[in-house]
Image: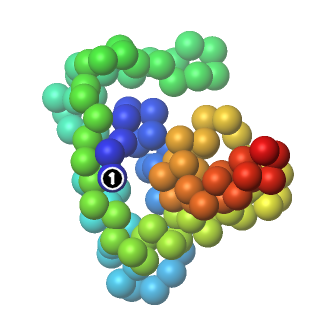
């Protein structure tokens, strides 16, 4: 799966919330390392705060390709679905929902159409 800087930040937040068995947690740790930012990326992006928002230099880093193990994929989908069910989903999380819950968005659009 391909992830932009914003999607990587959101993904890292969600990964930090996953709990499970040893296999799952090890896969999560490996994914955190793969999706995290290298020193070179951090320097190029120039992360900073503006008010309560994280900002960075747009276009400084290209999107990256990260393999998502099936166990981790299911855990991420469960968290996003839970946020949606509880009414806590945000617009910022939609790109991840499109990646991890594509059938939910498709069903909703069919119901509206």
Look at the image and tell me whether residue 109 can be seen. yes
Q: Dividing the image into 4 quarters, which one contains the C terminus?
A: top right
> Is residue 18 rendered to the left or right of residue 28?
right
Residue at the spot 54% in from the left edge and 49% down from the top edge: 98
Secondary structure under the numbered disc 1 in the rendered image:
loop
Q: Considering depth in this image, is 76 or 109 the residue closer to the camera?
A: 109
Point out residue 66 in the picture as x, y percentages from the top left corner: 27, 53
Residue extending farthest left: 40
Residue at the spot 38% in from the left edge and 67% down from the top edge: 28
Point out residue 25 in the picture as x, y percentages from the top left corner: 40, 75
**Residue 95 against residue 111 in the figure, above or below:** above
Q: Considering depth in this image, is 61 or 18 the residue closer to the camera?
A: 61
> Is residue 110 rendered to the left or right of residue 95?
right
Residue at the spot 39% in from the left edge and 85% down from the top edge: 22
Look at the image and tell me whether residue 36 can be seen. no
**Residue 10 against residue 28 in the figure, above or below:** above
Point out residue 43 in the picture as x, y percentages from the top left corner: 23, 22
Q: Quadrant of residue 26?
A: bottom left
Q: Considering depth in this image, is 19 or 83 the residue closer to the camera?
A: 83
The residue that label 1 is drawn on is: 1
Residue at the spot 65% in from the left edge and 52% down from the top edge: 105
Q: Considering depth in this image, is 92 or 103 the residue closer to the camera?
A: 103
**Residue 46 against residue 73 in the figure, above or below:** above
Q: Quadrant of residue 50?
A: top right
Residue extending farthest front: 113
Point out residue 72 in the picture as x, y percentages from the top left corner: 43, 70
Q: How is the image coloured?
A: rainbow
> Is residue 30 rendered to the left or right of residue 94?
left
**Residue 102 against residue 9 in the figure, above or below:** below
How many other residues sit within 10 Å of disc 1, few (<14), some (14-19) or many (≥20)? few
């Amino acid at each position: 799966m391909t992830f932009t800087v914003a999607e990587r930040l959101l993904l890292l937040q969600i990964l930090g919330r996953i709990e499970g068995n040893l296999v799952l947690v090890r896969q999560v740790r490996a994914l955190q390392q793969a999706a995290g930012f290298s020193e070179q990326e951090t320097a190029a992006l120039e992360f900073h705060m503006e008010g309560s928002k994280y900002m960075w230099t747009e276009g400084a880093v290209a999107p990256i390709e990260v393999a998502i193990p099936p166990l981790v994929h299911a855990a991420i989908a469960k968290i996003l679905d839970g946020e949606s069910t509880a009414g806590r989903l945000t617009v910022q999380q939609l790109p991840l929902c499109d990646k991890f819950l594509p059938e939910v968005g498709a069903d909703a659009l069919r119901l509206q159409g």
